[in-house]
Image (cartoon, rainbow, N blue to C red):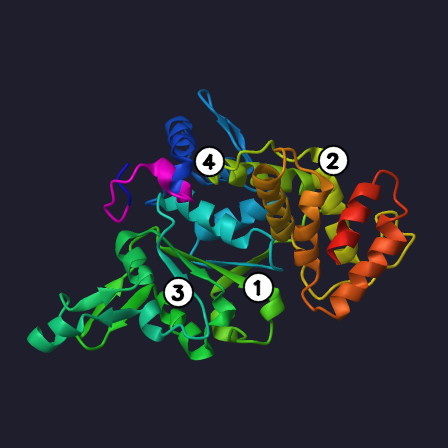
Amino acid sequence: MTTKNGDTTPGVSVLRQHAEDQFKHELEALAAADDRPRPPNWKLSPWAVCTYLLGGTTPDLEISAKYIGNRRLMEIAVTTLATDRALLLLGVPGTAKTWVAEHLAAAISGNSTLLVQGTSGTAEEQIRYGWNYALLLAKGPSREALTASPLMTAMNQGSMARIEELTRMPSDVQDTLITMLSEKTLPIPELGDEVQAKKGFNVIATANNRDKGVNELSSALRRRFNTVILPTPDTEDEEVEIVRRRSESLGKALEIPAEPASVDEIRRIVTIFRELRDGKTADGKTKLKSPTGTMSTAEAISVVTNGLALAAHFGDGTVRAADMASGILGAIVKDPVQDQATFKEYLETVVKEREGWKDLYRACREMI
């Protein structure tokens, strides 16, 4: 398989394929069966994009669910991108914001790689354009010397661009987006020229609501976005299914030679995370101290994947409590003083007394 960078390395050797490559067969099956109206330059209709995200069937193929949660949220997200409003996916860490953004871009444009990673060091040039300074010095300002940003490329192609962690970027850099989103134009004053967005162009941004107050969006920029808040999973069963699917997928991609973790083992991890996140036991009878970490679904997936690796390389290939214990400790104890005390109290008051959890209690106690 030839990659977007021109490499001819087989796709199976890539640690993590882009969504449009990994699920190419599903996107092709949906496109073949999709007879609904498509917005300009969209590869699929909004209905088919939602089917790709949430799972469904075509005459030839079963479509796997990429997002397990509220269907209406995905419908709102998709229809937003069919309008002149950009989309902002907001939520606590681990609520699949990046995952959803990547799959939206893959399904709509067939390309999820037009990406700007927001950091405190993100410069305006990464949003607008830069210059090839050798050509600039040799020939002066010209289109040839201009280096397009991912957003400029998306405007030229009429496709989706992604911005990760929008609120991590400095406020003056964020505001570079205003003209691009409102006028659908990128001025190039050095050339007395501009780039006008082709139909199909839009922006999918993500932001972590724990970063609130770091670099707040200006009211002018916020008006250009339609915000969809991605919540933590509503039910324990829903979260267990997410963790099971993703950990199995990661285990296969990493070629970990172990049996997938049992649903019962995953359920114990999810129960611990949900109880500590909510500050109370599942039955609501006991109040608990919450650790400083987020206790997100993404971290639960990481704990299970780490357990798979331990069982494969230092065990008999079957995931047990001892394989999960170190991952649980690493996910919960971020502050060595406060979180460790919180976890010890949880072990003694909840885990120790829970029927069928003695092995997990002993394994965790040995780690502290």
For disc 4, the marked residue is: 48
Q: Residue at x 85, y 60 (%)?
A: 345
Type of amino acid at the residue the image marks with label 3: Leu
For disc 3, the marked residue is: 181
**Quarter-of-image position of residue 239:** top right
Q: Secondary structure at mark 3?
A: helix
Residues under labels 2 and 3: Cα distance?
A: 47 Å
For disc 2, the marked residue is: 264
Residues under labels 1 and 4: Cα distance?
A: 28 Å
Q: Residue at x 11, y 77 (%)?
A: 137
For disc 1, the marked residue is: 208
Q: Residue at x 62, y 53 (%)?
A: 299
**Prevalent SS, magenta region:** loop
Callout in the foreground (2, 3): 2
Q: Disc 2 vs disc 3: Cβ atoms closer than 8 Å?
A: no
Image quadrant holding the N terminus, namely: top left
Q: Secondary structure at mark 4?
A: helix
**Quarter-of-image position of residue 7:** top left
Q: Which residues are magenta?
A: 4-19
Q: Of the two numbered discs 1 and 3 on the same chain, state the one appearing first in sequence.
A: 3
Magenta segment includes 9: yes
Residue situated furthest top in the rendering: 59
